[in-house]
């Protein structure tokens, strides 16, 4: 178990290191690119270039720059430093700290929705294979898998916000609304309901598919027959005996999806104007604000890598067979 | 589409055939095609895909008939007195115009070219790379396999949307880059499956037989083992196409894919977002075509999987008629 965990953590750290290094090479050490010139913008003067070179250390050898770049990323409080935004001279860590609560809110609500919807649809479909319910579930899954997130978001906005509002039924808030949960929890949920649905429905489709196939497989096992032979109610057999063990693949998927949304739901945030990591990174790219882009990409990569490790550990706890291999 | 009553038309086997020369042998490909032909959903999705392909091929024809080029802005005829886009059915514009007076029908036809090109080309690259890497890793094993398998694990655990955005922001958006980025994040999915299959296939006796006949490693890998892996690869590749199309549309929607004024369904929707919902036709038609295409490919992928593996139950194709004895 311990060895398994250590291997996973090492693999995660390698992934993170690969990402960090790739980002460094792409942004600072590509052959034929002068990062100072890119940062300087249109009004280039030799003095400005010299200043930028000095501030960012571009005049030093690449390997020294790489070392400083890595060194700043060591996660010790007070030492960790992602640089300063080119726009408003705020530290990138501050910008990220302001955006993260939005992503956490988005992820929390959406995760509840997609788990509940995804697993219930999957269970209903698996209890009566080939029934009308099952066919309906399949339609839901295929639509969800084929649906680009931005189309779902735009459709929800068009139908539930625009059409209702022009007909005088303004139930849903206009895009760009955001209230912190500490200010007003009800308003918080009200502002996030459409983004939650957007994020959740597409992910829920995958969960339904996973739950259905996994539950159907479990229901064919010997111990389920034993449970039925003992005279347990079908409800108890499905929910207490079968569902529990068939949820293991869902756990894996859950961790990865949760981390993905926490690290910035780029499309959803762009459509609904939510000022989270995803919107921040898109805006930073448009003005070539490199420190912000790099900072957010690294934080979001760290979320995903950490989630992968946690998921693997959970998986090993839930399914003892994993530990052996 | 009626879900409950799906009739199955099995190819009639004429009674003379068995009498004439015993049971006729059928190749696996023939069997698969026979199964697909009984699957109405598969037929429908193939028809939809063919129509989209026709639309893409016929794009210049549509442009010639309507007299509007894909990037041609028609300030005089294409917008109303206030410079607003025209609704569908306006003189000469079947699906209406966009904010610059461009013909939406023509742009959708040209956009189909982009979507299909990206979907097919990215999948083809990913499949070739994935198959080659997977075969080498699985066949040779040892440290070579460990390195390649870890590499694929790292790629699969990448926060790929973020990373795609980094690459595009560094090199600037372009069609070839979009295709390469999608291929890069897709090959590992195929590579992992092929590797697993190759690992088990290389222990089989036919491989030993080929060795003893003097076949080289390359010949064994690509001539003897590869044909046995075709089924899972085809299924996965079919399902990668819609994923690639969605990925391209998403990148273009965010302004990081196909560069305007070249039309792509994604960047058309991004243009539409700038106009507002009152021009609903500007949203609905690109959405409709995008959804129809991804849905058709996903349905086809599922159908091909079921046809290749007759043991899986098919939800929409009717039950097989029981043989009368």
Image (cartoon, helix red, strand yellow):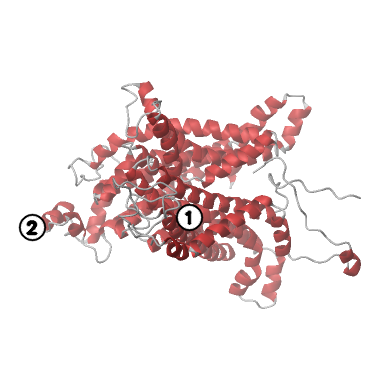
Chain for numbered disc 2: A
Q: Measuring 26% from the left and 42% from the top, which residue is drawn there?
A: A80
Q: Is B246 left or right of B21, judged from the image as shown? A: left
The residue under label 2 is A47
Residue B175, given in percent of the width and then of the height, sits at 39, 61
Q: Measuring 50% from the left and 40% from the top, which residue is drawn there?
A: A203
Camera-side residue: B215 or B67? B67
Residue B190 drawn above or below residue A258: below
The answer to whether residue B196 shows anywhere in this view is: yes
Q: Is B119 left or right of A279, judged from the image as shown? A: right
Circle 1 or circle 2, nearest the eye: 1
Camera-side residue: A22 or A120? A120
Mark 1 and mark 2, same subunit?
no
Chain for numbered disc 1: B
Number of residues whose C-alpha sits closer than 10 Å to that of mark 1, classed few (under 14), some (14–19) or many (20 or more): many
Q: Total label count?
A: 2
**Secondary structure at numbered mark 2:** helix
Residue B266, given in percent of the width and then of the height, sits at 41, 51
Camera-side residue: B195 or B278? B278
**Secondary structure at numbered mark 1:** helix
Q: Measuring 32% from the left and 52% from the top, which residue is drawn there?
A: B100
Residue B176 drawn above or below residue B289: below
Q: Measuring 57% from the left and 64% from the top, which residue is drawn there?
A: B135
- The circle on residue B244 is 1
Q: For the view shown, which residue lies furthest in the left direction?
A: A47
Q: For the view shown, which residue lies furthest in the bottom direction?
A: B214
């Amino acid at each position: 178990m311990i060895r398994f965990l250590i291997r996973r953590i090492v693999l995660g750290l390698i992934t993170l290191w690969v990402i960090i290094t790739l980002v460094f090479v792409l942004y600072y050490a590509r052959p034929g690119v002068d990062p100072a010139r890119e940062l300087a913008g249109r009004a280039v003067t030799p003095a400005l270039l010299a200043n930028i070179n000095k501030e960012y250390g571009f005049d030093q050898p690449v390997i020294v720059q790489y070392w400083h770049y890595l060194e700043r990323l060591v996660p010790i409080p007070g030492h960790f430093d992602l640089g300063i935004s080119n726009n408003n001279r705020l530290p990138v860590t501050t910008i990220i700290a302001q955006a993260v609560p939005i992503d956490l809110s988005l992820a929390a609500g959406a995760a509840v929705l997609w788990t509940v919807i995804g697993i219930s649809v999957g269970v209903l479909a698996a209890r009566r294979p080939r029934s009308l319910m099952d066919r309906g579930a399949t339609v839901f899954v295929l639509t969800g898998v084929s649906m680009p997130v931005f189309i779902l978001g735009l459709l929800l906005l068009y139908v539930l916000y625009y059409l209702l509002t022009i007909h005088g039924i303004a139930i849903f808030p206009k895009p760009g609304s955001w209230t912190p949960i500490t200010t007003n929890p009800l308003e918080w949920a009200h502002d996030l309901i459409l983004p939650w649905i957007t994020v959740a429905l597409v992910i829920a489709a995958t969960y339904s598919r996973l739950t259905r196939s996994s539950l159907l497989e479990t229901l064919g096992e010997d111990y389920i027959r034993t449970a039925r032979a003992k005279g347990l109610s079908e409800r108890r057999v499905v929910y207490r005996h079968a569902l529990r063990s068939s949820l293991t693949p869902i756990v894996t998927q859950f961790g990865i999806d949760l981390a993905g949304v926490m690290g910035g739901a780029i499309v959803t945030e762009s459509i609904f104007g939510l000022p989270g990591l995803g919107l921040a990174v898109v805006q930073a790219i448009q003005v070539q604000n490199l420190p912000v882009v790099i900072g957010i990409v690294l934080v979001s990569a760290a979320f995903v890598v950490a989630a992968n490790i946690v998921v693997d550990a959970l998986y090993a706890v839930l399914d003892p067979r994993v530990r052996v291999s | 589409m009626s879900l409950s009553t799906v009739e199955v038309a099995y190819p009639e086997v004429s009674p003379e055939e068995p009498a004439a020369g015993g049971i006729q042998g059928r190749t696996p490909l023939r069997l698969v095609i026979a199964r697909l032909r009984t699957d109405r959903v598969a037929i429908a999705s193939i028809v939809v895909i063919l129509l989209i392909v026709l639309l893409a091929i016929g794009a210049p024809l549509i442009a010639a008939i309507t007299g509007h080029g894909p990037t041609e802005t028609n300030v005089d005829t294409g917008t109303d007195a206030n410079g607003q886009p025209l609704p569908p059915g306006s003189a000469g514009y079947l699906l209406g115009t966009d904010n610059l007076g461009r013909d939406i029908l023509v742009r959708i036809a040209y956009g189909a070219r982009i979507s299909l090109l990206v979907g097919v080309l990215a999948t083809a690259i990913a499949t070739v790379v994935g198959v080659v890497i997977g075969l080498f890793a699985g066949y040779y094993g040892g440290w070579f396999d460990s390195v390649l398998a870890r590499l694929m694990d790292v790629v699969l655990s990448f926060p790929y949307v973020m990373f795609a955005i980094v690459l595009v922001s560094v090199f600037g958006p372009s069609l070839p880059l979009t295709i390469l980025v999608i291929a890069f994040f897709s090959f590992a999915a195929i590579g992992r499956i092929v590797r697993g299959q190759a690992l088990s296939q290389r222990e089989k006796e036919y491989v030993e037989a080929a060795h003893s006949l003097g076949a080289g490693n390359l010949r064994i890998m690509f001539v003897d083992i590869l044909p046995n892996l075709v089924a899972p690869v085809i299924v996965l590749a079919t399902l990668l196409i819609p994923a690639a199309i969605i990925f391209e549309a998403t990148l273009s929607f965010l302004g990081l894919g196909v560069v305007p004024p070249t039309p792509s369904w994604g960047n058309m929707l991004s243009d539409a977002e700038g106009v507002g919902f009152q021009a609903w036709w500007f949203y609905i038609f690109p959405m409709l075509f995008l959804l129809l295409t991804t849905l058709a490919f996903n349905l086809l992928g599922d159908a091909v999987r079921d046809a290749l593996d007759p043991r899986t139950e098919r939800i929409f194709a009717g039950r097989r008629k029981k043989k009368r004895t």
